[in-house]
Amino acid sequence: MPLSRVVAGRETTTMIFARISSCVSRSVAAGIGIVCLFSISAQAGASVAAGEKLARLWCASCHVVASDQEAGNPDTPPFSEIAERADLSEASMEIWLAGTHPVMPDMSLSRAEIAALVAYIESFSAN
């Protein structure tokens, strides 16, 4: 008798194998999703850390860029204030940092450095 037939209402080996295969596929997909989330989280953490290094190097002479920094230029907003501005999005900060500005140094940041700096600024946001 072929394995693909149901005998007296019972599942055959082929049907059982198909169900197990489907469960394994879902489990593998879930596992891959979890690994990706951890990877994204680790990358975000690394990006924030890289952004902090850049901020201390390029921005700390004017902006207050960290809680352990005593002072910055009083005419320049601290990163914590910039992070809370409703009119600034990730995209608008990236555009701003990619351009040159007479008051700011020409940092010539790469896209990865800009993304890291924006991630660091956004880490100050309470939202």
Image (tube, rainbow, N blue to C red):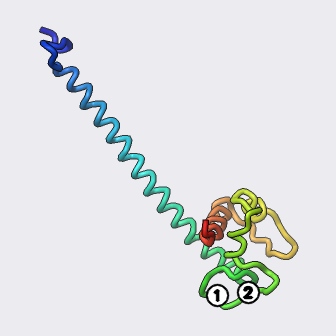
Q: Nearer the viewer, residue 73 or 102?
A: 73
State the quadrant of the C terminus. Answer: bottom right
Element under label 2? loop
The relative height of residue 126 versus residue 36 in the rendered view (above or below) is below
Toward which corner of the image does residue 100 lie, by quadrant? bottom right
Q: Residue at x 26, y 28 (%)?
A: 19
The relative height of residue 97 versus residue 8 in the rendered view (above or below) is below
Q: Residue furthest right?
A: 102
Q: Residue at x 61, y 84 (%)?
A: 67
Q: Residue at x 16, y 10 (%)?
A: 2
Where is residue 17 shown, x and y percent of the image? 22, 26
Q: Nearer the viewer, residue 41 or 56?
A: 41
Element under label 1? loop
Q: Amino acid at mark 1?
A: Gln
Circle number at residue 37: none
Q: Are marks 2 and 1 in contact (CB under 8 Å)?
A: yes
Where is residue 72 shown, x and y percent of the image? 73, 86
Toward which corner of the image does residue 75 lie, by quadrant? bottom right
For label 2, count other residues whose C-alpha is less than 10 Å away and answer few (under 14), some (14-19) or many (20+).
Answer: some
For label 1, count other residues whose C-alpha is less than 10 Å away and answer few (under 14), some (14-19) or many (20+).
Answer: few
The residue that label 2 is drawn on is 72
Q: Is residue 31 left or right of residue 50?
A: left
The residue that label 1 is drawn on is 69
Where is residue 120 shown, x and y percent of the image? 62, 70
Where is residue 6 shown, x and y percent of the image? 18, 13
Q: Amino acid at mark 2?
A: Gly
